[in-house]
């Protein structure tokens, strides 16, 4: 029996439908496996792999001479794979982790119970002791991986320049914040195969994607000059007892490079959140660029420069100061009665009457032309966060009295950075320089990625006016109010400043000096906010000696030859770190060096200048005692020592030794200079000497 036509049609129809379906499936399969394969693979990858991030090494911050100011030390990161923690284990795991890491147990339970994430972070920057304790728990699902912790070897030194990082190593202040994109690097990852419910599988291989190290940042800061500056500010805090602190900036006036910048109070960036929360922002605040103040008589350098440049005064022109001057019915006093004096003597005496007269001759338009040209009322553009523009009143609001008070630095607010940058222009031939805090950004091989070169913003005054002002300001120190800033053998130029705030009895004392006067190599400004010295509140008495200390140390360090003084013999600074204090003192005395002691304790933790530095006899070496406590020591350099010598040295410091090989030490972990607790083990690799 043959099928009829109706059956044949149905068979053909079904065959057609099957062909269409098969073709559609083939197209769909092609679409999924060929066209969309990459997209679906990306979507599926998280379902069959566990990705654990690997923290990259953050870039190092160096001073201008390659000394490390911020680096990384190894730490540990604790994570949990929630799906591998059994329900019955949660309480036990949370109890153990919270006990070891000093965390809230309920928070740990909450994290462990998060099934929406493959890897849950429990803690970062965990030290080796706690990490090893967690490893000993031997609990499936707890991951101990390598982490990095930011470390500032000089602790408080230049803290307001460097800033600090947060728990995730992200920059939160200072250079760490501004250059975070360069410093942070790119994280790596470890990919591990997992099954359908998120458990690790023993089959397959882990894939390791290496992290990319961050770029390094080279500052204009000189670590040694920074130490000189910090030492001088410590003395200022003791002598002046200021309520609001002290600021110091040291700069190369010819390039605008900042050699040192320090504030008091300060903080340790290794532990920036120490103390009361309400005090943090006071300690972190970089007053050198963020706080404005009335500069007082230091600002007279600007008025004098403008008057000379505009030709409204002669050097030998006579003025008469009865102790005051009347302006629009208001009496403006001078701090003393100077009688008859020349213009130069008026600058030496810091006479308000002379400068009010000069401002009247200049007028508002011309005086303001120079105020703006010297950079006041606008940010300098320094690469640090939180810079303030200062405060300059609009010209339309300036009457005769305001013009008069502006001439001697009242009624105008400037930042310390603006002030030193402006006077640098007076010192260097009239060029306003862009302040620099960073020299370059380099990779791990030393290749320069980006360079920051000195930049002239504008020519403010002529070289002739600049040379004249240098001579006048030199006479201020040799004959005028700045005598306490005089340094034997050097021509120091400078200007004092004392401003009474709008609260009776509250003052700002300052001094700005540069040397040598005829060819300035360095300029320094110190501002003391609300000194509480019962004997004086004047910048000449409080701030000038601080600047003198900074300049004297810096000029010697820069090997600027003093005039008419025979240079002292040179000696090499010995290594006295890890010595008892009395031993270190005897070693320094025997090498014809002086010393001062900072900190508490019986053991020398660090020193400045560093071992091996070549200095003049009678140079002062700062001995930093073990502020970290008697239970901490600094790891010595063991290179070249025999097993016996290395073991004896470490034992004497309360450290243990793990010996690998024999012969003489070639490598050690941790490295020389690392701060560790007594009782910790130092792993030392020894090798025989080659013939």
Image (cartoon, grey):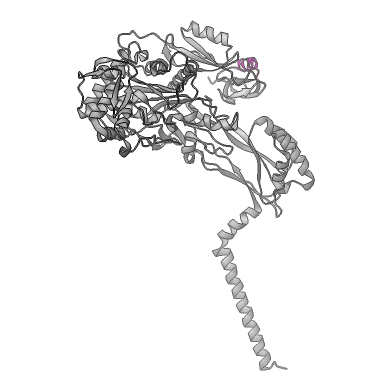
Q: Nearer the viewer, residue 286 or 437?
A: 286
Residue at the spot 66% in from the left edge and 86% down from the top edge: 11
Q: Residue furthest right?
A: 88
Could you say where residue 222 lies in the image, as x and y percent from the top left? 42, 24
Could you say where residue 595 lies in the image, as x and y percent from the top left? 49, 11
Residue at the spot 66% in from the left edge and 49% down from the top edge: 118
Looking at the rendering, which quadrant does residue 73 occupy?
A: top right
The prevailing secondary structure element of the residues shown in magenta is helix
Is 652 one of the magenta-colored residues? yes
In this picture, which residue range is highlighted in magenta?
Answer: 641-655
596 left or right of 256? Answer: right
Looking at the rendering, which quadrant does residue 423 occupy?
A: top left
**Number of numbered labels in the structure image:** 0
Answer yes or no: is residue 234 visible. yes
Could you say where residue 18 lies in the image, as x and y percent from the top left? 64, 79
Answer yes or no: is residue 254 visible. no
Is 346 one of the magenta-colored residues? no
- Quadrant in which the N terminus is drawn: bottom right
Q: Nearer the viewer, residue 317 or 330?
A: 330
Could you say where residue 373 lies in the image, as x and y percent from the top left? 29, 34
Q: Nearer the viewer, residue 122 or 570?
A: 122
User: Quick check: 195 above or below 492?
Assistant: below
């Amino acid at each position: 029996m043959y099928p009829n036509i109706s059956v044949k049609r149905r068979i053909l129809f079904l065959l057609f439908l099957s062909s269409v379906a098969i073709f559609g499936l083939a197209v769909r399969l092609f679409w999924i496996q060929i066209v969309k394969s990459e997209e679906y693979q990306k979507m599926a990858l998280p379902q069959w792999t566990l990705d654990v991030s690997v923290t990259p090494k953050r870039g190092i911050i160096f001073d201008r001479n390659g000394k490390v100011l911020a680096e990384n030390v190894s730490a540990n990161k604790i994570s949990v794979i929630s799906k591998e923690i059994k329900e019955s284990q949660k309480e036990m795991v949370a109890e153990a982790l919270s006990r070891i890491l000093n965390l809230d147990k309920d928070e740990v339970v909450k994290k462990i119970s998060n099934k929406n994430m493959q890897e849950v972070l429990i803690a970062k920057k965990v030290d080796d002791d706690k990490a090893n304790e967690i490893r000993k728990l031997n609990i499936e699902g707890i991951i101990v991986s390598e982490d990095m912790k930011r470390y500032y070897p000089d602790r408080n030194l230049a803290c307001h320049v460097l800033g600090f990082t947060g728990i995730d190593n992200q920059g939160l202040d200072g250079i760490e914040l501004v250059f975070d994109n360069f410093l942070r690097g790119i994280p790596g990852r470890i990919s591990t195969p997992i099954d359908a419910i998120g458990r690790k599988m023993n089959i397959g291989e882990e894939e390791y994607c290496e992290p990319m190290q961050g770029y390094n940042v080279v500052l204009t800061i000189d670590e040694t000059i920074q130490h000189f500056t910090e030492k001088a500010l410590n003395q200022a805090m003791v002598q002046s007892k200021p309520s609001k602190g002290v600021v110091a900036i040291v700069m190369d006036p010819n390039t605008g490079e900042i050699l040192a910048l320090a504030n008091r109070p300060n903080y340790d960036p290794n532990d920036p959140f120490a103390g009361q929360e309400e005090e943090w922002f006071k300690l972190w605040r970089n007053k050198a660029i963020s706080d404005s103040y009335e500069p007082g008589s230091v600002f007279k350098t600007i008025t004098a420069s403008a008057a000379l440049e505009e030709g409204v005064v002669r050097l030998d022109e006579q003025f008469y100061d009865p102790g005051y001057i009347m302006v629009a019915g208001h009496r403006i006093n001078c701090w003393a009665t100077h009688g008859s004096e020349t213009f130069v003597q008026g600058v030496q005496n810091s006479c308000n009457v002379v400068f009010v007269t000069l401002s009247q001759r200049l007028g508002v338009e011309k005086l303001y032309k120079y105020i703006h040209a010297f950079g006041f009322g606008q940010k300098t553009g320094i690469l640090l966060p939180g810079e303030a523009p200062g405060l300059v009143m609009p010209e339309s609001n300036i009457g005769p009295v305001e013009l008069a008070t502006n001439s001697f630095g009242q009624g105008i607010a400037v930042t310390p950075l603006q002030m030193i940058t402006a006077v640098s222009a007076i010192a260097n031939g009239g060029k306003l320089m862009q302040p620099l805090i960073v020299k370059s950004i380099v990779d791990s091989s030393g290749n320069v990625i980006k360079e920051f070169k000195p930049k002239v913003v504008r020519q403010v005054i002529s070289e002739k006016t600049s040379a004249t002002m240098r001579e006048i300001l030199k006479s201020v120190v040799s004959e005028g109010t700045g005598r306490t800033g005089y340094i034997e053998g050097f021509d120091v130029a400078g200007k004092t400043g004392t401003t009474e705030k709008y609260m009776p009895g509250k003052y700002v004392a300052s001094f700005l000096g540069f040397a040598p006067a005829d060819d300035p190599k360095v300029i320094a400004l110190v501002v003391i906010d609300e000194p509480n010295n019962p004997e004086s509140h004047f910048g000449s008495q409080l701030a000038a000696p601080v600047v003198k200390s900074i300049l004297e140390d810096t000029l010697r360090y820069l090997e600027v030859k003093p005039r008419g003084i025979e240079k002292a013999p040179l000696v090499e600074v010995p290594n006295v770190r890890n010595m008892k204090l009395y031993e270190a003192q005897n070693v320094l005395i025997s090498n014809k060096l002086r010393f001062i002691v900072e900190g508490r304790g019986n053991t020398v933790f660090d020193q400045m200048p560093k071992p091996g530095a070549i200095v003049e006899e009678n140079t002062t070496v700062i001995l930093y005692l073990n502020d970290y406590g008697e239970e901490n020591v600094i790891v010595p350099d063991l290179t070249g020592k025999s097993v016996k010598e290395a073991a004896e040295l470490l034992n004497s410091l309360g450290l243990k030794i793990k010996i690998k090989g024999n012969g003489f030490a070639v490598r050690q972990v941790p490295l020389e200079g690392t701060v560790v607790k007594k009782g910790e083990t130092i792993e030392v690799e020894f090798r025989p000497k080659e013939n």
